Image (tube, grey):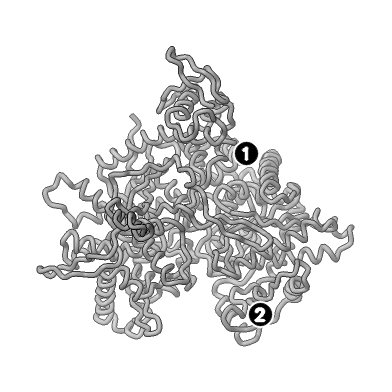
Amino acid sequence: MAASLKANGTATVKAGIPAEIPAIAHPLPEDPAEIASNINYHAQYSPHFSPFKFEPEQAYYATAESVRDQLIKQWNETYLHYHKVNPKQTYYLSMEYLQGRALSNAVGNLDIQNAYADALKQLGHELENIVEQEKDAALGNGGLGRLASCFLDSMATLNLPAWGYGLRYRYGLFKQLITKAGQEEIAEDWLEKFSPWEVVRHDIVFPVRFFGHVEVQPNGSRKWVGGEVIQAVAYDVPIPGYKTKNTNSLRLWDAKATAEDFDLFQFNDGQYESAAHLHSRAQQICAVLYPGDATENGKLLRLKQQFFLCSASLQDIISRFKERNNGNNEIQWSEFPTKVAVQLNDTHPTLAIPELMRLLMDVEGLGWDEAWDITSRTIAYTNHTVLPEALEKWSQSVMWKLLPRHMEIIEEIDKRFIAMILATRPDLENKLSGMSILDHNPQKAVVRMANLCVVSSHTVNGVAQLHSDILKAELFADYVSIWPTKFQNKTNGITPRRWLRFCNPELSHIVTKWLKTDQWVNNLDLLVNLRQFADNPDLHAEWESAKLASKQRLAQYILHVTGVSIDPNSLFDIQVKRIHEYKRQLLNILGAIYRYKKLKEMSPEERKNTTPRTIMIGGKAFATYTNAKRIVKLVNDVGAVVNTDPEVNSFLKVVFVPNYNVSVAEVLIPGSELSQHISTAGMEASGTSNMKFALNGCLIIGTLDGANVEIREEIGEENFFLFGATADEVPRLRKERENGMFKPDPRFEEAKQFVTSGAFGTYDYNPLLDSLEGNSGYGRGDYFLVGHDFPSYMDAQARVDEAYKDRKRWIKMSILSTAGSGKFSSDRTISQYASEIWNIEECRVPKV
């Protein structure tokens, strides 16, 4: 029930809103009473539900719209300020964003958390409960998307003129259900009602063409015509900075067909599907993130998505550039790279390169040389992987079919690149087959997207020092010899707002108290000053108490979503990330199986001397990735046995946490004491969850991979549980395996045999375990070195058990972990991008 105003201005009561709270619009409220009135106003006058309800769901939408009022004012002021100052701006193109909940982040960044909590109390609700009503926006999958979202937060906090561009996926990747059969996938429902945070811009619509053909005009210029044209409509999401007026935008494109595209004659003739044919094609584009690409149609759809993002975004960027230069009689295109920086987040937006060329030449009338100079000074590329299957290669025939003009442009870029090599670096002629953009292999002619990015961008960066070194020494070594200054490292970071200040209030309060300032929230380097208190018993007591509160909250969450009761006094050991063989959740669960077997063999007295442990694993396996799904099933099967075994279940629990996303991470990470970052060395570009865990005082067991290397350097190697082969040893170890020289550790054999014995049910795990057997062959030969690293992994886990028993030592290590995390703020990362790649500067909205 919402309150309503009678003619004389007094309020009547409806379902829970007190009569004394009037429904009055206060878009910029100054106190909790005005906020409560503004929320009540939205409940009545921005209605989305029948008028007699004000339950938590209705309260959430009304609260979100009240907060949005403040955001829109700041948003408009930011937009006007950028328009007036006309600074160089960055446009960040990413297929994924994992935003997490917006309400808690917005009230935190606007510093109005307490005021909103008080206002909602007056309305009979708790802010904590209202926040829980929000569904995570299903716009991403893993680290790539979450990194993009952390970057947006830092751009706004640092007052940088920067926008994000992405797609508005209706059903996301998928919602993960865990059943007896393992993982099942259903569509995400985050837009089932609507998102209160997005604003549709009906005036920002661009046509995006697919298929068709190229016509040569009388003047010799070329034009792409025919095919099908879909409309890209902008939906803007505000991105507020922390304690600043700057509010940037994440612009998401949705695909629509027009009324003209609806064939009324066919419809009235009973041909309903064909009448709305283009509407149906348009809906497919933004339906699902990463649709299955095993079929020709699947490949076409993925390529359509990528081009749709690139074309709409670049048309928008050019339109904004022209708008800001509308005082000039003639557009100065040579100034475009001094006003625009475009960052490609991985290879998914690579088509921005030929599309910018096409728009400049075919639409704006520039010649090749000028268009190429502008494009190559505007675009920069971030590489996120060394995994061969993740370095995109698109079939040339599919590309010619969908994007004929772009293939002409790519051919020309490739031709000119090869000519340049032959003219200036004849020593590289024998390397050209691997360096060229087009691979003309008659069996499978492809376009190598990473090569196109490297050739066309002014800067290429990796995302951790080890990863960047591997790129320069191996993957892109030949390009480095041509353009040594093109390659940089930008170690990833995370926003300390979401990942400590808001998700872990107890620990955050302690950090502020001991540092005597909350400035660490946007200057994370200040955390280093905690080191001087690392042995202080008062800090130890407070630190342990904060951790216990987070563990209790996590235990309640696990009970709620899985029905499994876990002991907050046990060691909470967590691995949450995309399920992939290189991330080695299989190593983790085999270790847990070995631990269970040993506990079963112990006497009751011996068990009492062990360190009780709760192992939690979470993450989504791609729907078509069979071995990853088998790993999910194995974790659940092991948990079903271990957790119901009365001899052992007070010493070990194994839990699979379903449907891992940002909001789940915000509960798991503060409650974690040990986290596993155990990928095969050299295969994880960076990782960012490792940074989130370390920041929250969680210790890491891990390999020397990705950002683990730098985390270990920063927090001190004595505070990191290291194991496993190093990146430079991996190729030799694989070779030795192929030559039959690998000798498995008996513990490894024991763990595998325990699975095949049927101890965890009747499911046939042989196809999964076969990947660890043999010396070579597809899907065999233990490519990810699980067997090689197993003994040192188990030894490291034994060191964890011992360290955990020494409470003083463990808490000191935990404090030093947080104290050493200053480097891993996304504010530092983005400052480096801004000054070293984008050449953009702060453009702070003045406080009036």
Q: If you read the primary sequence from the N terminus, does the residue marked by circle 1 or circle 2 appear first?
A: 1
Mark 1, residue position: 506
Residue 525 seen from this side: no
Please name the residue shown 37% across and 76% down the image. 446
Residue 763: x %, y % from top left: 71, 70
Q: Is residue 221 left or right of residue 784?
A: left
Residue 781 seen from this side: yes
**Front in this rendered view, residue 570 or 511:** 570
Residue 716: x %, y % from top left: 60, 56
Quarter in which the C terminus is drawn: top left
SS for dot 1? helix
Residue 110: x %, y % from top left: 45, 35
**Quadrant of res 270:** bottom left
**Front in this rendered view, residue 231 or 314:** 231
Q: Is residue 369 left or right of residue 169?
A: left
Dot 1, crowdedness within 10 Å: few (<14), some or many (≥20)? some
Mark 2, residue position: 773
